Image (spheres, grey):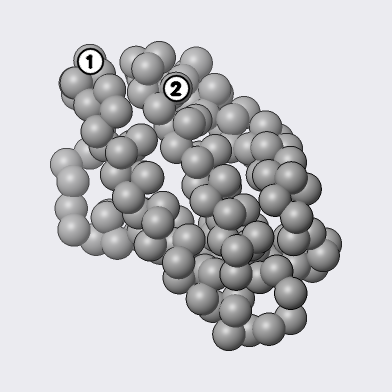
Amino acid sequence: MNWVRFALAVVVSGVAITFTDWFFFGVLFHEKYNAYPEVWRVSQAGNKAIWIGIGFFTCAIFIYACTSLKLYNYGAVLKLALWMWLALALPIIVTDGLFMKLHPLVAVSHSLGWFTRLAVAALSVTLIMRK
């Protein structure tokens, strides 16, 4: 594996998903977060840094998985993203939506945000990691 390309793919996808996260986790259905204000913590600067770090970590793990499986074709990589989203992110978000006080549209925006994260990482694999 070319570690320079790997690092570049992680940085590019990580930066891109900070913007998609801002849209899906902050802007889309923003007023619905106030349906149950007692659920949300007061935002702190450290929390945002942790959230951005989780995004970069997600991209790194997904890109590493694709290169380990030797998947560089966009169709195959997007299929892996879809299966990972269905197996990992979606069940957690649905469970949170069922057992926590969350507006259903907040759960929808979070699930779309997680799929977008994986799709952006998939795009970076096909554009940067392809040999």
Please name the amino acid that badge 2 sits on.
Val
- In-image side of 113 versus 89 (left or right): left
| Residue 61 in sight | no
Which x, y percent locates residue 54?
Answer: 45, 58
Quarter of the figure with residue 11: bottom left
Q: Position of residue 39 (x, y in %)?
A: 27, 27
- Closer to the N terminus: mark 1 or mark 2? 1
Q: Which mark is residue 27?
A: none
Residue located 36% across and 23% down the image: 106
Q: Is residue 23 left or right of residue 14?
A: left
Label at residue 35: 1
Relative to residue 127, is residue 79 drawn left or right? right
- Of the residues shown, which amino acid type is indicated by label 1? Ala
* Residue at numbered disc 2: 108
Q: In the rendering, at what x and y percent does residue 101 appear?
A: 35, 18
In the image, residue 43 sits, relative to residue 71, either above or below, namely above
Check the image and report above or below for 62 versus 81: below
Q: Residue at x 74, y 45 (%)?
A: 75
Relative to 100, does residue 9 appear above or below in the rendering?
Answer: below
Say which quadrant the C terminus sits in: bottom right
Quick one: label 1, few (<14), some, or many (20+) residues within 10 Å? Answer: few
Give the distance between the C-alpha atoms of the residues marked 1 and 2, in whole angstroms.
15 Å
Which structural element holds mark 2?
helix
* Tag in front: 1 or 2: 2
